[in-house]
Image (cartoon, grey):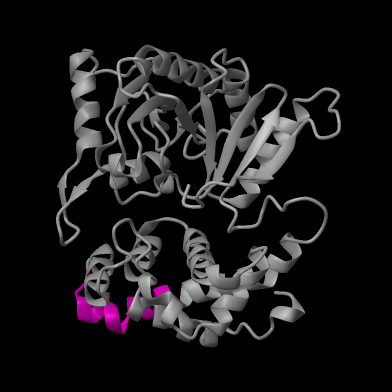
């Protein structure tokens, strides 16, 4: 933490985080949150009257740094950051957070809740100590956590780069989801991209309980209809399904790209750049096939770093393989998107794309702040 951020002690920040938990995101403007406001300020060009939005973005960034699993899930529920939770009463949010740990509400209140909120406060303190350094220097800071998407341009090809969890994407027609060659989705409680999309696509009742699992159910049906229920598909196969509850966020299709090959008898996978490039090209081709069958026609598609999670492919190799397919795309009116959770991966993507320019001219690769909504 930088010397200027010494005032951001965890205990003090924790008190303000607890105020947000009690009152909810919709009442941030009415709360006295001097530390959270100052922590958000280094990540913003101007906090001014929009400071409640900046504080919320700061909390979202802090929670994403918790990784996956029960800790992050509980933090999202208890602070109202999970989809549909921002205006729910504190008691409802606490109940759902307790379920993430499979404990009673009272036990969660006395034990896990303090730990969860303290972890969020620690991440806020860390961000407060690094934000000023990230926004110094010429040009926009790609790593600034509140800037959740950028436009990268290499020659005639432009791609929007999102830096946030995949389930926060909004108004993107198609999301490509990496999967294994058995087209078997992981459980909703996992931390991977396919698990997050399955979880976000689930239909829930007023209590937050899952009542339908449409993304999984449609993928099972696709396997049955294509006679691959009992055997793996070839690497590079892409299976389309509907988005389930993600339709409310403007997502229209999920393309499940088989890029990882399970090693028999182990928990490991094999993945190659060739299969990643092949799956990306197939996803673009499938989008063309489905384009005019839907109204309005499909125009935008978003890729995570295929194979760079459990598949073990180095992120740089995944970026290069993806770009070999995206840069060859002949449909110039298509909107291309990439999504990563961590700012450092966003910087890596920019570096890899710069390297594709053999003799870059000044300004040929432009990284600029997206002017659209920050929610993705």
Tell me, yes or no, if residue 187 can be seen here.
Answer: no
Spot occupied by residue 34 in the image (x, y as percentages of width and height): 56, 84
> Was residue 111 drawn as part of the magenta stretch in this picture?
yes
Residue at (47% x, 62% y) in the render: 60
Looking at the picture, tell me which residue is in the foreground, 248 or 195: 248
Q: Residue furthest front?
A: 49
Quarter of the image for residue 226 reads top left
Residue at (25% x, 74% y) in the render: 89
Looking at the picture, tell me which residue is in the foreground, 224 or 88: 88
Q: In what quadrant of the picture does the N terminus appear?
A: bottom right
Residue at (69% x, 83% y) in the render: 6
Looking at the picture, tell me which residue is in the foreground, 89 or 108: 89
Residue 302 vs 127, above or below: the answer is above
Tell me, yes or no, if residue 299 can be seen here.
Answer: yes
Q: Is residue 313 left or right of residue 364?
A: left
Is the stretch drawn in magenta largely helix, strand or loop?
Answer: helix
Spot occupied by residue 176 in the image (x, y as percentages of width and height): 42, 30
Q: Is residue 25 left or right of residue 201?
A: right
> Was residue 128 drawn as part of the magenta stretch in this picture?
no
Quarter of the image for residue 137 reads bottom right
Residue 162 vs 64, above or below: the answer is above
The span picked out in magenta is 103-117
Total tally of numbered discs in the picture: 0
């Amino acid at each position: 933490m930088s010397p200027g951020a010494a005032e951001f002690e965890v205990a003090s920040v924790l008190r303000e985080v607890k105020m947000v938990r009690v009152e909810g995101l919709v009442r941030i403007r009415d709360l006295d949150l001097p530390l959270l406001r100052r922590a958000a300020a280094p990540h913003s060009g101007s906090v001014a009257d929009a400071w409640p939005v900046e504080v919320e973005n700061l909390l979202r960034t802090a929670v994403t740094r918790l990784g996956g699993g029960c800790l992050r899930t509980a933090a999202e529920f208890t602070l109202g950051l999970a989809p549909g939770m921002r205006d729910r009463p504190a008691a409802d949010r606490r109940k759902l957070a307790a379920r993430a740990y499979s404990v009673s509400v009272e036990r969660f209140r006395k034990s896990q809740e303090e730990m969860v909120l303290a972890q969020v406060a620690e991440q806020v303190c860390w961000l407060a100590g690094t934000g000023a350094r990230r926004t110094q220097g010429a040009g926009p800071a790609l790593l600034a956590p509140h800037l959740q998407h950028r436009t990268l341009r290499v020659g005639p090809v432009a791609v929007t780069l999102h830096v946030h969890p995949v389930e926060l994407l909004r108004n993107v027609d198609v999301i490509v989801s990496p999967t294994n060659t058995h087209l078997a989705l992981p459980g909703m409680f996992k931390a991977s991209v396919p698990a997050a999309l399955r979880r976000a696509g689930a239909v829930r009742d007023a209590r937050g309980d899952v009542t339908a699992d449409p993304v999984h159910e449609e993928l099972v049906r696709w396997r049955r209809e294509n006679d691959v229920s009992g055997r793996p598909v070839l690497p590079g196969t892409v299976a389309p399904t509907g988005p389930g509850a993600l339709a409310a966020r403007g997502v229209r299709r999920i393309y499940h790209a088989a890029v990882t090959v399970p090693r028999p008898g182990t928990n490991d996978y094999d993945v190659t750049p060739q299969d990643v490039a092949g799956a990306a090209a197939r996803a673009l081709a499938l989008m063309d096939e489905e384009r005019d069958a839907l109204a309005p026609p499909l125009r935008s598609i978003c890729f995570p770093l295929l194979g760079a999670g459990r598949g073990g492919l180095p992120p740089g190799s995944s970026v290069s393989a993806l770009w070999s397919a995206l840069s060859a795309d002949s449909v110039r009116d298509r909107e291309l998107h990439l999504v990563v959770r961590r700012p450092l991966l966003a910087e890596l993507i920019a570096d890899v794309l710069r390297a594709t320019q053999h003799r870059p001219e000044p300004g040929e690769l432009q990284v600029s702040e997206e002017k659209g909504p920050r929610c993705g």
